[in-house]
Amino acid sequence: MELFIIFLSAAIVNNFVLSYFLGICPFIGVSNKLTSAFSMGLATTFVLVLTAVVTWLINHLILMPAGLDYLQYVAFILVIASLVQFVEMFIKKTSQPLYRALGIYLPLITTNCAILGLALFMVLRDYSMMESIFFGLGAGVGFTLALTIMAGIREELELADVPKPFQGVPITLITAGILAMAFMGFSGLI
Amino acid sequence: MSKTQTRYSEVFMNGIWKQNPIFKQVLGTCPTLAVTVSVINGFAMGVATAFVLLFSSMIISLIKKLIPNQVRIAAYIVVIATFVTIVDIVMKAQFPDLSKALGPFIPLIIVNCIILGRAEAFASKNTVGRSILDALGMGAGFTLALLVIGGIREVLGSSKFLGTVILPATVEPMLIFILPAGAFLTLGILFGTANHFEEKKKAKEIQRAIDNQMGAKNVNVTAAETTETAEKEKEA
């Protein structure tokens, strides 16, 4: 039950994008088309869960026993960067269709704040291995959800008559604001 | 001599408005939205980012010839992460309250696109002196933008400015502005307004160029008028 609450909290109530502002760059950059937004969401979810496992192991098996807590940030970011690289190579070797679907989005994920944010929140909240995995999964689902909803709205926005100075980024931000307001409605859920 | 000097000042001023990291390049939006609940938080975040930007730009432009091209991004990130760790430890020791308020957003400076972006686009191609100026300009531009957003959100959302109440009690604070939704709305509206003035300015410049070409006396008068109004707008 606790695991489910962690999952739900990361996915909907404290949505990573709309209430922690993690992963805003791809949220604004890649949310033009529904299909690419969904692929980006899937790729990010995959990397999020992997990161949760690997950073937990590194933090609990190497850094904490050795008293190297101050190396956390350097270690995490290096792990994330190399992990993304490995995932890209692995997918390229094993599944060509998946690579073609996710390929271009994978390198972008390294600089997605959601990934490093996940690792930092995990440490801050002292999650166990299982909790971390569910947290990562929830964060990924929440990211995919926000990105897909946004892409759907933006496809409709193309047809709307937006004042010229507000076209592009400004209207996207305002839409995100309204979306965040809508998500506030979930706050009583947990 | 004067030529190089203007170019140096240009490098610095670029970051403040022409290529402002937030309003022009749309970089580093995560911390911008997350920590600007109040002026002081925005200021702390801006200074911390500027510090990391300054030192990482300096180091990266110093060692740019030593880094093999294939691993440059990883090398940049390690340099950046080292300085972020320093900032984080110093803040925890000296300003524990601020450090608690900013939470994981201090370590998240590592993935702030401004720093990696400037390292890749500027510091890796320019001399140390120019990189330092560029970092200072970008850092100042970022801090200014955070101050503006933080100011608007603090006044509207909690009727306070720098912690002291400035609006009369009859004005109900609009809570939405210190909630996440308000962050998106504030930045969106500011962004649109900035675009609006930029477009107006551009239109005026084109108009002025046309007027100058015509060279007629009466047209020159209107051109002078437009510059006057442009200056007034700037002041406003």
Image: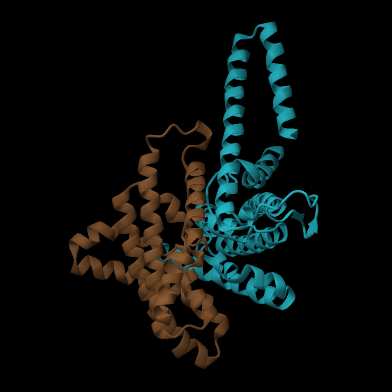
Chain colours: A brown, B cyan
| Residue located 43% across and 76% down the image | A5
Query: Would residue A181 be visible to someone looking at this image?
Result: yes
Residue A41 lies left or right of residue B100; in this view the side is left
- Say which quadrant the N terminus of chain B sits in: top right
Q: Is residue A142 above or below residue A2?
A: above
Position of residue A73 in the picture relative to residue B235 (left or right): left
Query: Taking the image as drawn, is residue A30 in sight?
Result: no
Residue A55 location in percent, x, y? 43, 79
- Residue B56 position by quadrant: bottom right
Location of residue B27 in the rendering, given as x and y in whole percent from the top left corner: 53, 52
**Quarter-of-image position of residue B8:** top right
Residue A182 percent location from the top left of the image: 48, 54
Taking the spot 57% from the left edge, 73% from the top edge, the residue there is: B82
Residue A150 x/y as whole percent: 40, 50
Q: Is residue A14 left or right of residue B5?
A: left
Query: In the image, is residue A62 above or below residue A34?
Result: below
